[in-house]
Image: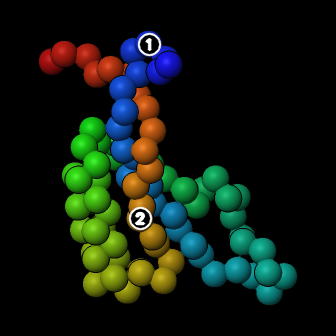
C-alpha cells in the first residue's frame, strides 16, 4: 500500500560522466555527478523532456559526458496554489 500523501511522479535526472584520471577513478565524489533537474507528474512529459535535454547536450558537444534519464518515484501531494 502506498504511503499516505505520496503520489507517483517522474524525476528528470542528469548524470555527469566526467573522464577518469590516470588511476582510473573519478576526480569527484559520485554524489556530485547526479542531479535531479525537475520532477513532473506525467511519464510522457518526462520522456519528452529527457529527449529534449539529451538532444541539447548532443548539439553542444556534451553528449559523451552528460546523460539525462527519467526515473519513476513518489512525492508528497503538491499544495494547492
Where residue 42 sits in the image (x, y, percent)?
24, 43
* Image spot of residue 47 (x, y percent): 28, 59
Which sits in the foreground, 11 or 7?
7
Residue behind mark 2: 68
Image quadrant where residue 52 sits: bottom left
Where residue 37 appears, as percent x and y from the top left, is 38, 51
- Closer to the camera in the image, 65 or 7: 7
Q: Please name the residue shown 50% across and 19% down the image.
A: 1
* Relative height, residue 63 to residue 46 (above, below): below
Of badges 2 and 1, the one in the foreground is: 1
Of 4 and 12, the residue lying toward us? 4
Task: Locate residue 4 relative to residue 81 in the image: left or right.
Answer: right
Residue at 59% across, 75% down: 18
Could you tell me which residue is drawn at 49 percent across and 53 percent down? 35
Residue 81 left/right relative to 78: left
Rendered position, 77 above or below 74: above
Residue visible at 23% across and 61% down?
A: 48
Q: What is the secondary structure assignment of the residue under circle 1?
A: loop
Q: Horizontally, is 19 left or right of 36 in the view?
A: right
In the depicted structure, whether residue 21 falls above or below residue 32: below
Q: Splitting the image into 4 quarters, where does residue 53 fall?
A: bottom left
Q: Classify 10 Å Cα crowding around label 1: few (below 14), some (14-19), many (20 and above).
A: few
Is 5 on the left-hand or right-hand side of 25?
A: left
On residue 47, which mark appears? Answer: none
Give the mark, 2 or 1, whose residue is nearer the N terminus: 1
Mark 2 and mark 1 in contact? Answer it, CB < 8 Å.
no
* SS class, disc 2: strand
Name the outermost residue toward the top: 4
In which image quadrant can residue 30 be found?
A: bottom right
The CA distance from mark 2 to mark 1 is 30 Å
Amino acid at each position: 500500500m502506498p504511503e499516505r500523501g505520496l503520489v507517483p511522479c517522474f524525476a528528470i535526472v542528469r548524470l555527469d560522466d566526467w573522464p577518469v584520471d590516470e588511476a582510473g577513478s573519478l576526480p569527484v565524489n559520485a554524489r556530485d555527478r547526479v542531479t535531479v533537474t525537475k520532477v513532473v507528474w506525467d511519464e510522457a512529459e518526462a520522456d519528452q523532456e529527457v529527449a529534449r535535454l539529451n538532444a541539447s547536450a548532443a548539439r553542444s558537444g556534451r553528449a559523451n559526458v552528460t546523460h539525462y534519464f527519467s526515473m519513476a518515484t513518489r512525492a508528497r501531494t503538491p499544495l494547492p496554489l
